[in-house]
C-alpha cells in the first residue's frame, strides 16, 4: 500500500463531491494533514460504473469530504460521498459514490467546464519537490476533463501534445431504482499518464 500523492504525502490530493453550495453548520476540526490509504490489488476491478467487484470490498473508505482550504470555517458536505482507491503495477483505480437528489450534468465536451455542474474531481501532485500536478474530472453523464499543470495556475494549462494524450478510462452511472438518488463513477488511470513526473511510484 502507499499514501497518495506518490511521494507518500497526501496533502496534495483533493477529492470533491458533487457541486453543492450548502453545508451543515458544524465546522470540521482538522489539526494535521489528511492521509488516505491506497491498497494494492491482485484482482483489478472491471471499469463499468457498478463498483461491484470484490476488489473494492478490501479498499479503505474515504468519506470525510469537505473544503479544506476554508481552514477553521470548513464544513462537511451536505450530501455524502464515499470514495475508494486501489493500485497495481499498471494502474491507479478510484471508485466514488455520490448521494445527490438533484444531479446537474449538461456538459458533453471533453475538457469542458465540468466544475460548473456536478462532477467528481481528483488532483494529484506526484512529487512534493516539483510544482507540476494533474487534474481529472468525471461528470455524471460520463464526460471527462484531464490536464497537467506544470505549475499552479490555470494560465499554465498543458494537456499534452493533443487531446487524448491521457489514457485513462472512466464510467459514470446513476443509481438504480430502489436506491437513494445519486451516482457512481469508476475509473482507472495508467501510470504512463504520469510520465511527466516520473510515472509509477516506487
Image: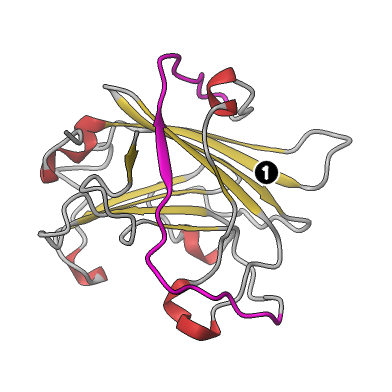
Q: What residue sits 28% from the left and 22% below the top?
A: 90
The foreground one among 81 and 137 is 81
Q: What residue sits 15% from the left and 65% below the top?
A: 151
In the rendered view of the protein, which quadrant contains the N terminus? top left
| Magenta stretch: includes residue 9 | no
Residue 113 picture quarter: bottom left
On screen, residue 55 versus residue 173, left or right, reads: left
On screen, residue 56 versus residue 50, left or right, reads: left
Question: Residue 170, percent across and down?
Answer: 47, 34
Magenta stretch: dominant secondary structure: loop
In the rendered view of the protein, which quadrant contains the C terminus? top left
On screen, residue 186 versus residue 144, left or right, reads: right
Residue 54 picture quarter: top right
The foreground one among 1 and 54 is 1
Q: Residues within 10 Å of mark 1 (few under 14, many from 20)?
A: many
Compared with 176, 17 (above or below) is: below
Compared with 71, 128 (above or below) is: above
Question: Residue 42, percent across and down?
Answer: 40, 15
State the extent of the magenta-drawn residues as a range.
25-48
Check disc 1 and report the residue beneath it.
183
Mark 1 lies on a secondary structure that is: strand
Question: Residue 195, percent across and down?
Answer: 14, 38
Amino acid at each position: 500500500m502507499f499514501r497518495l500523492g506518490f511521494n507518500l504525502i497526501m496533502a496534495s490530493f483533493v477529492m470533491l463531491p458533487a457541486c453543492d453550495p450548502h453545508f451543515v453548520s458544524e465546522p470540521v476540526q482538522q489539526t494535521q494533514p489528511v492521509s488516505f490509504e491506497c491498497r494494492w490489488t491482485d484482482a483489478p476491478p472491471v471499469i463499468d460504473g457498478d463498483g461491484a467487484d470484490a476488489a473494492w470490498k478490501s479498499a479503505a473508505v474515504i468519506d470525510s469530504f469537505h473544503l479544506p482550504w476554508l481552514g477553521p470555517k470548513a464544513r462537511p458536505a451536505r450530501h455524502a460521498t464515499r470514495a475508494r482507491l486501489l493500485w497495481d503495477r499498471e494502474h491507479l483505480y478510484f471508485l466514488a459514490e455520490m448521494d445527490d437528489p438533484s444531479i446537474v450534468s449538461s456538459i458533453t465536451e471533453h475538457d469542458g467546464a465540468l466544475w460548473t455542474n456536478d462532477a467528481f474531481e481528483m488532483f494529484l501532485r506526484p512529487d512534493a519537490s516539483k510544482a507540476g500536478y494533474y487534474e481529472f474530472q468525471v461528470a455524471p453523464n460520463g464526460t471527462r476533463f484531464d490536464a497537467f499543470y506544470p505549475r499552479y495556475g490555470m494560465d499554465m494549462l498543458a494537456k499534452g501534445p493533443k487531446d487524448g494524450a491521457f489514457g485513462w478510462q472512466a464510467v459514470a452511472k446513476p443509481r438504480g431504482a430502489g436506491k437513494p438518488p445519486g451516482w457512481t463513477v469508476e475509473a482507472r488511470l495508467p501510470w504512463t499518464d504520469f510520465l511527466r513526473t516520473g510515472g509509477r511510484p516506487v
